[in-house]
Image: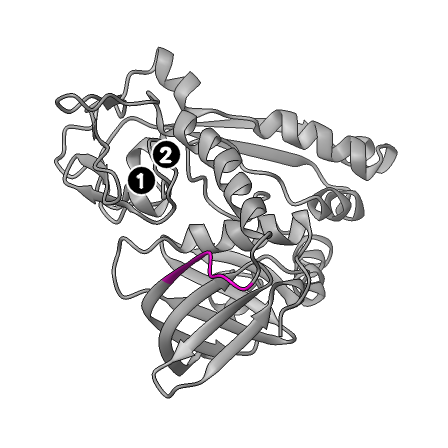
Amino acid sequence: MLLGLVGSIPKSKAIPDLETIGWIVEVIRKRGGVVGLFAEGQASWDGHTQAIIPSTAKLLKLLKVPVVVAVLKGSFSSQPRWAWNHRPNYMEIEFKLVMNGAELKAGTPEQILAVLEAAMDYDEEEWKASHPVRCGVSGRARHLELSLFMCPACGQAGTMRSYVNRLYCRGCGHVVRLSKDMAFTRVGSSRPRFVSIREWDLWQQSAFADLLRRARATPALPVFSDSGVLLLKGRRMNPLLKYRTGSLILYPDRVELATLLGERLQFPIAEIEGQTVIKQQLFEFYHGRTLYQFRFPRRFQSARKWAVAIEVLKATGLPPATS
């Protein structure tokens, strides 16, 4: 239906989807069309290229058609992943012919992936060094805590809040200002530990992983939680239906929803697949064949924090199950 009406191919995000691959093959081989792919599967949180989905290389080898990469430069400054407001600014789109059909046929998936990663590699901070970007609108830092959810001063996760052009910690009071050139500056005696969003995010990746590893030593204790969360559930392309509301709680081995009805819905982390963030703040994952989506009532509640936590806990191993 979508393919016929608007030329859009539906895709289940963050999980393998053989039906989607079939549609892509049909468009290219049978219809002689062109297909656009977002090889990262998600927009950047810090202006740097995200990890490319490895199976993309296998798909390209299967198709054996010319591959053109479009690198969007300045798009992060114009519309950050965590923001609802647009910031009119300068942008460039660079098109690169990466590989042709013969090269795809001769290359291994690993070689194709390496070429694709090199062609798509981009850092907004490096680009801004020769293309100065100034964001004159007020509210530059609004909702930045959706991305930078961990305080670099006290190390707490989920305590960051934004107000107009400032980002501050409710736990320890650390505060910084986001300037017109999107750099962090001091506020009074509070000095920024990092200059750029990218630098803060790189620190956060390491510090948050350390926090989660430490939490594994006490599996019976919650790591963090968010209240007032609405849970919806569904299957593939079917509409999501409201299911429960309650407090979403992360333990080192599971995610729980303590519902308003007094239930404790449990999702073992080892059984969760396809955890991801939709747009700014919708948190989704698959448990079995069912898609669960969690909607947060307040815009300071970071969905990214949940997706990253599950990814890290799955990668580092889980603590023994508690009774």
Seen in the image, is 139 located left or right of residue 100? left
Amino acid at dot 1: Gln
Q: x%, y% of residue 16?
A: 68, 60
Q: Who is closer to the viewer here, 66 or 71?
A: 71
Residue 59 visible in image: yes
What residue do we see at 62% from left, 40% from top? 52
Q: Residues within 10 Å of mark 1 (few under 14, many from 20)?
A: some
| Residue wearing tag 2 | 75
What residue do we see at 12% from left, 36% from top? 138
Image-quadrant location for residue 38: top right
Amino acid at dot 2: Ser
Say if the magenta span includes residue 239: no
Please say if the residues under marks 1 and 2 sit with CB atoms less than 8 Å apart: yes
State the separation of the CA atoms marked 1 and 2.
6 Å
Element under disc 2: helix
What residue do we see at 66% from left, 28% from top? 98
Q: Who is closer to the viewer here, 154 or 234?
A: 154
For the magenta stretch, what is the residue range? 220-225
Above or below, 8 relative to 163: below
Seen in the image, is 180 located left or right of residue 255? left
Q: Looking at the image, which residue sits at the far top?
A: 130
